[in-house]
Image (spheres, rainbow, N blue to C red):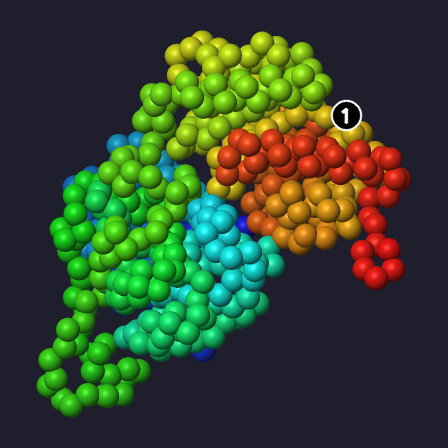
């Protein structure tokens, strides 16, 4: 995971002071509630996910200050928490983060700090999953060529804690070699695009051009934009999206020109308790932000201003909202483990059973070996343990929580032993399905590769690479993980690797233990497994994993 922009160190919240960028990377150390509120109000810390996490640590700071001999003054903490939550009214994540930590108050200060630290770690995983799902969607919606995308404001690691949401999707596309250029809106009046996004683009080595906000529609008209990708501060039950001022006019221009308008945000940004976008309280900011910049007046003294910090884009202008759970289908529906566990699962179970029987017939899931899962929100439906895959039915499934791999239904069945492998993928990727199988040639390659002490298997020149979701069509490096009798350790190894290597392809080897593949659908996950096995068979027949491509084959 990219270096976090937020940390907790020695009783202080440590972050990057965004007011100093791009000229200076200045550390901001926050130790009081007043400093938390000031940092949020002055935009030293900004971005919905980032202020949510900062708000959570702000409650911890309040509790530390209100503690005497280990006893916390609950009333004082609750009052301070309310002050923090009111610092910026539009972004729902701030109140969400405050409430999550405050809910742990009865359990004591340690529990509150643990909750805030969990939120910090969770944010990076959530961002990467949402970014990957959004990148997959953008590639499906747009032409099969290097893409030209436009973004507004800042949605990278500065606005979150790590990786980013909309900018995270741009980073995934860049690492896949699928991005030609990003047009960055300057984002008046505080120039978050110019000061922060352009800085993050340069830091990540992503080709980009900066433009004035009023040039964005003309860039679309002159065919310089394939899609618009933005973040969100609040998403209401009717699908309306509150985001940095200027987003609404981009959505109107994108619809006029037939360009996809994609919103990338965490589930925590969704506010289904607010029925309509028109119900959102839009923050009005100081006149000085419009009448001048950097201490220099640019308008006559006494000029009145209209300075909303956000605008609200109606759902009909939004092509898709993408979160860590994938594309949002019903904006009014909560996507939680409880709702997913009780949702009808017969159709998904039937699809899993059908594919499992086919793979059993091919010899890839002999006896009870192998397993398949489909994600359903923050749960997954996975094949049960100890059952022959040749006789599997729709009822032979277990619903597990993605967060900890534990069953959440009352069937009494145990999930497949490799469930932790599946959930490791779901926690780090935007995948909707995972297939773990034991095809002979790929399994043999995993053994010989691991035996040589190599941790990745490189293949080059094979046409089948194109079917594996590699960042390059001509070469792929597939990780090889050691086998462990303790299967959860395999899952832990995989999660660590995928978190640290966002560019990793959606396939992997486990030495002597088969292969795992994933994708946005069960069919694609199976197809990727089949492509990998076919390529491994070819390398076995030819004796070469890399073949030359060019004029002198």
Whole-percent x and y of residue 128? 48, 48
Q: Provide the secondary structure element on which disc 1 rests.
A: helix
Q: Is residue 99 visible?
A: no
**Count of numbered badges drawn on the protein:** 1
Q: Residue at x 23, y 65 (%)?
A: 309
Tell me if residue 186 comes above or below residue 253 in the rendering.
Answer: below
For mark 1, does the 10 Å Cα neighbourhood hold few (<14), some (14 to 19), or many (20 or more) residues?
A: some
Q: Residue at x 73, y 33 (%)?
A: 533
The foreground one among 142 and 264 is 142
Q: Residue at x 70, y 20 (%)?
A: 362
Q: Quadrant of residue 297?
A: bottom left
| On-image quarter of the C terminus | bottom right
Q: Is residue 498 visible?
A: yes
Q: Quadrant of residue 536?
A: top right
Whole-percent x and y of residue 529? 65, 33
Tell me if residue 505 comes above or below residue 302 in the rendering.
Answer: above
The foreground one among 74 and 159 is 159
Whole-percent x and y of residue 60? 32, 46
The foreground one among 535 and 88 is 535
Q: Residue at x 48, y 18 (%)?
A: 350
Residue projecting furthest to the bottom: 300
Residue 400 located left or right of residue 485: left
What residue is shown with label 1?
Answer: 440
Residue 533 located left or right of residue 148: right
């Amino acid at each position: 995971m990219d270096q976090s922009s937020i940390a907790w160190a020695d009783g202080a919240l440590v972050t990057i002071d965004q007011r100093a960028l791009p000229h200076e990377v200045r550390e901001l150390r926050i130790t009081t509630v007043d400093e938390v509120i000031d940092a949020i109000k002055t935009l030293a810390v900004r971005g919905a996910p980032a202020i949510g996490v900062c708000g959570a640590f702000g409650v911890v700071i309040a509790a530390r200050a209100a503690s005497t001999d280990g006893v916390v003054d609950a009333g004082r903490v609750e009052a301070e928490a309310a002050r923090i939550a009111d610092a910026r009214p539009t972004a729902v994540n701030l109140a969400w983060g405050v409430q999550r930590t405050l809910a742990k108050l009865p359990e004591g200060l340690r529990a509150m700090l643990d909750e805030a630290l969990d939120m910090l770690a969770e944010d990076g995983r959530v961002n990467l999953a949402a970014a990957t799902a959004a990148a997959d969607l953008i590639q499906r919606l747009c032409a099969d060529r290097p893409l030209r995308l436009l973004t507004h404001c800042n949605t990278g690691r500065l606005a979150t804690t790590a990786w980013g949401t909309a900018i995270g999707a741009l980073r995934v596309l860049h690492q896949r070699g699928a991005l030609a250029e990003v047009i960055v809106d300057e984002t008046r009046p505080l120039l978050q695009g110019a000061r922060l996004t352009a800085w993050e683009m340069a830091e990540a080595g992503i080709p980009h051009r900066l433009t004035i906000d009023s040039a964005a529609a003309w860039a679309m008209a002159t065919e310089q934009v394939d899609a618009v990708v933005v973040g969100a501060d609040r998403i209401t039950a009717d699908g309306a999206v509150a985001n940095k001022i200027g987003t609404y006019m981009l959505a109107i221009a994108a619809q006029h020109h037939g360009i996809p308008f994609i919103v990338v945000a965490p589930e925590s940004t969704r506010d289904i308790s607010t029925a309509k976008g028109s119900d959102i309280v839009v923050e009005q900011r100081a006149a000085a932000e419009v009448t001048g910049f950097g201490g220099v007046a640019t308008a006559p003294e006494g000029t009145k201003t209209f300075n909303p910090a956000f605008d609200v884009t109606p759902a009909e202008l939004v092509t898709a909202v993408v979160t860590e759970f994938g594309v949002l289908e019903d904006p009014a529906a909560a996507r939680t483990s409880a709702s997913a566990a009780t949702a009808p699962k017969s159709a998904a179970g039937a699809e899993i059973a059908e594919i499992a029987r086919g793979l059993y017939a091919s010899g890839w899931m002999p006896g009870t070996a192998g397993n398949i899962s489909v994600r359903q929100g923050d749960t997954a439906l996975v094949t049960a343990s100890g059952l022959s895959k040749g006789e599997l039915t729709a009822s032979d499934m277990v619903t597990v929580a993605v967060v900890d791999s534990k069953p959440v239904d009352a069937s009494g069945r145990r999930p497949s032993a490799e469930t932790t492998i599946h959930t490791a993928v779901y926690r780090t990727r935007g995948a909707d399905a995972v297939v773990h199988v034991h095809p002979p040639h790929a399994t043999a390659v995993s053994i010989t590769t691991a035996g040589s002490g190599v941790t990745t298997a490189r293949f080059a020149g094979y046409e089948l690479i194109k079917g594996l979701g590699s960042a390059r069509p001509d070469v792929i490096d597939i990780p090889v993980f050691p086998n462990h009798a303790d299967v959860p350790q395999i899952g832990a190894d995989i999660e660590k690797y995928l978190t640290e290597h966002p560019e990793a392809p959606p396939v992997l080897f486990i030495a002597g233990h088969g292969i795992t593949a994933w994708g946005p659908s069960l069919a694609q996950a199976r197809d990727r497994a089949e492509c990998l096995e076919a390529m491994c068979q070819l390398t076995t027949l030819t004796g070469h994993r890399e073949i030359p491509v060019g004029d002198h084959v």
